[in-house]
Amino acid sequence: MPLDADALLRSLDDRADEMVALTQALVRIPSVNPPGAFYRDCAELIGARLAKRGFAIDYQRAEGAPGDSDAYPRWNVIARREGARPGPCVHFNGHIDVVEAGDGWSLDPWGGEVRDGRVYGRGTCDMKGGIAASIVAVEALIDSGAELPGALEISGTADEESGGYGGVAWLAERGYFSKPRVDHVIIPEPLNVDRVCIGHRGVWWAEIETKGRIAHGSMPFLGDSAVRHMGAVLERFEHELYPALAAKHTAMPVAPDGARQSTMNINSIHGGQAEPKEGLPSPVVADSVRAVIDRRFLVEETLEDVKGEVRGLLERLARDRPGFRYALRDLFEVAPVMIDRDAPVAREAAAAIERVLKKPAQFICSPGTYDQKHVDRIGKLRDCIAYGPGILDLAHQPDEYVAIDDLVASSKVMALAAGKLLGAL
Ligand SMILES: [Zn+2]
């Protein structure tokens, strides 16, 4: 029997309550990262549910990954259902971890309360609502009784909020996100229901240390102040680096607009004597100051260029400024990713958005990274997007919610796109 798209869409309208109930059930498991709690519970909730639809369930603990311990094991679940005949595999990947609730909530962050057409709670938006919508979308496809070629996969993975090393990265290293096992990946992160996210900017975190020489604070000329040297670095940032970053243009459709360029945040500066808990400080010249920078870059830039810009600035200071000594240490790096708008998964998601929402899809890139980086770099699988319900700005905020209408609309888009990618439509 061929897939009837209209009947599929109607059946998803009828499943709104199921999406709400599944979102609530997931939100009521406080899988907070750090430390990475209750992953097994979340994984089993997903696995037990999909087993009933004929999925083979595979639980994988990322042993040896950062953060994995017997107290906080990094459990992942991968569910796979083979279709009627060979064909491509469509994979939905959601991270099961959430950030801490934090302060400022007007309702229970772990309650999953429904109010005014919204489900509230930590992770409703980022991204347990997206996981629920993708699961129900896939169930509706299966329940349609249509012949589905290929295979469907759904994974719930750990640690996205802390880099994904105990989740998608670990699985990708073991072949879970590569051909021939998987062909198309949709990550239902909260990027708004009418937007297809085709990639993200790159990241370079580094620590810059300026070095000085300790001396008595009443005779600073006998020492050499690392704080003043860091001040010189900051001045060069203001007058040279920031204007240069603002002048870079990109073809990446990064949203929001402010991130449609290179950016750099000075994450922290620590130096000199630690502030005393009580009493007065003692007079010393600072012998070391460390700044952590968070540089986000574009597909038009290479990591070497990005590092070279900062190193060049420091080298010029070392040449021009008496006594200037520094160290530059890499902390973390991620390459930028952007796939074509007409890549199969992006094209089909956009077509489905147009059909369901009756307006053209918007293509965007994310200002920050998410697990697509591992699918791309480790899995070598390009055909991956982020698409899901929820408003990006609400992620990690108090009173986070997902709108029930968005759950339903996104599930329709995901079901249609998957049906098309499998060749059932
Ligand atoms: Zn997320």
Image (tube, rainbow, N blue to C red):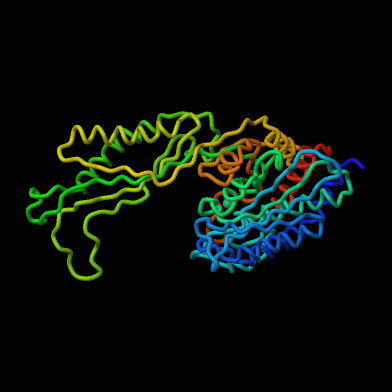
Q: Residue at x 7, y 53 (%)?
A: 219
Q: Is residue 401 visible?
A: no
Left or right of 162 in this view: 289: left
Left or right of 362 in this view: 321: left
Q: Nearer the viewer, residue 253 or 257?
A: 253
Q: Residue at x 24, y 63 (%)?
A: 275
Instruction: Please provide percent x and percent y for residue 260.
Output: 49, 35
Instruction: Please provide percent x and percent y for residue 272.
Output: 22, 55
- Place residue 23 in its image quadrant: bottom right
- Place residue 234 in its image quadrant: top left
Q: Nearer the viewer, residue 210 or 188?
A: 210
Q: Residue at x 26, y 40 (%)?
A: 233
Instruction: Please provide percent x and percent y for residue 215.
Output: 11, 54
Left or right of 280 in this view: 207: right
Residue 391 vertical position relative to residue 24 in the rendered view, above or below: above
Image label count:
0
Q: Where does the N terminus fall, quadrant-wise?
A: top right
Which residue appears farthest toward the bottom when viewing the image? 278
Residue 262 vertical position relative to residue 163 in the rendered view, above or below: above
Q: Nearer the viewer, residue 78 or 174?
A: 174
Q: Nearer the viewer, residue 3 or 413?
A: 3
Residue 331 vertical position relative to residue 315 in the rendered view, above or below: below
Q: Where does the C terminus fall, quadrant-wise?
A: top right
Instruction: Please provide percent x and percent y for residue 337.
Output: 55, 36
